Image: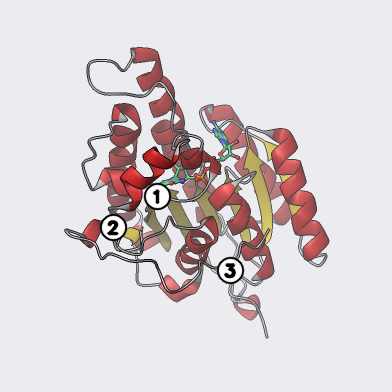
Amino acid sequence: MSGRLQSKTALITGAGSGIGLESSLLFAQEGANVLLADINLAAVEKATALVQQRFPNIKALAVKADVGKEADIKAAVDLAVSEFGRLDVMFNNAGIMHPEDDNALNTEERIWDLTMQINLKGVWWGCKYAILAMRQNPVDEARGLHTGGSIINTASFVAIMGAATPQLAYTASKGGVLAMTRELAMVHAREGIRINSLCPGPLKTPLLMDFLNTPEKRDRRLVHLPMGRFGEAVELAKAALFLASDESSYMTGTDFKVDGGLTSAYVTPLGEPVLPPPASLV
Ligand SMILES: NC(=O)c1ccc[n+]([C@@H]2O[C@H](COP(=O)([O-])OP(=O)(O)OC[C@H]3O[C@@H](n4cnc5c(N)ncnc54)[C@H](O)[C@@H]3O)[C@@H](O)[C@H]2O)c1
């Protein structure tokens, strides 16, 4: 049986950890050649070695790229096209949550600028170079390959809900991702290029767990989660796979929420969750 991304090429940013790492493994498992990009070269090389070891028939490459630098993103997209011949899936997933990000009074301009540079401008550039590449994708009916492609931009539930635990720059950057994605989706809808946002709820990845570094801080969040647990990166990877594949062919411009019910909640249930979280692919 062929995979859900058979013969396709995917570029994943922030591939050295969390959602990006799980997605790299899952996309490769489903038949895609993958280019793993991250600012942390050691992490992305380790991730790529794992993909190659698990899926020897898949081509996997690592590249050091800072998504806050336009030249790095262009180079990564060019590398995907030169090595794999096309770009079908662009997962603009890398993002930061700066420890000094705070409220409107305390957040320093340099924190705002850095966060916007990576979380919002980085996504813009990722979309820009992916669109240019996807327009050139050769059609290969026999292998189910077409022109255009699927772009997935990682936003966050904080782009939809207010939190009294402020991270002004992060929240604003993610709101920007949602708005920008909708507009891009409309502009390119007739080119076979679908562009969707992925909106994770709070996850058990280093990005959030480094921040919620005491049981009190974690409990402050857990009470708001209907399922009574944080999400797992692999649960987001599965949603990203759906958006990446042709199974979501009639979806573009959506805010795809994978949040354990968080954004639908008023009062959450008491008690422990009965189901365990799914296992990581790593
Ligand atoms: N963890 C959560 O609770 C949560 C919730 C909502 C949204 N998100 C978003 O999901 C995305 C992935 O987060 P995660 O939880 O997997 O985090 P993570 O910290 O596990 O992984 C993020 C990866 O991005 C890389 N990275 C950081 N800055 C980069 C840059 N400038 N260029 C390239 N790579 C860079 C890091 O080296 C790391 O490997 C982020 O955009 C984040 O904002 C996370």
Q: Is mark 2 in CB contact (under 8 Å) with mark 1? A: yes
SS class, disc 2: helix
Distance between the alpha carbons at the discs numbered 1 and 3: 39 Å
SS class, disc 1: loop
Q: Quadrant of the C terminus?
A: bottom right
> Callout 1 environment at 10 Å: few (<14), some (14 to 19), or many (20+)?
many
- The first of marks 2 and 3 along the sequence is 3
Residue at image x 51%, y 28%?
68
Q: Nearer the viewer, mark 2 or mark 3?
A: 2
**Quadrant in the picture for residue 214:** top left
Residue 95 or 99: which is nearer the viewer?
99
Residue 180, image x and y in percent?
31, 43
Q: How is the image coloured?
A: secondary structure
Q: Which residue is mark 2?
A: 262
Q: Which residue is mark 3?
A: 139
| Residue 31 seen in the current view | no
- The first of marks 2 and 1 along the sequence is 1
Residue at image x 34%, y 42%?
177
Q: Is residue 115 left or right of residue 180?
A: right
> Callout 3 environment at 10 Å: few (<14), some (14 to 19), or many (20+)?
few
SS class, disc 3: loop
Q: Is residue 156 above or below residue 51?
A: above
Q: Nearer the viewer, mark 1 or mark 3?
A: 1
Q: Which residue is mark 1?
A: 202
Q: Amino acid at mark 3?
A: Val
Residue 72 or 236: which is nearer the viewer?
236
Residue at image x 48%, y 59%?
236
Q: Is mark 2 in CB contact (under 8 Å) with mark 3? A: no
- The first of marks 1 and 3 along the sequence is 3
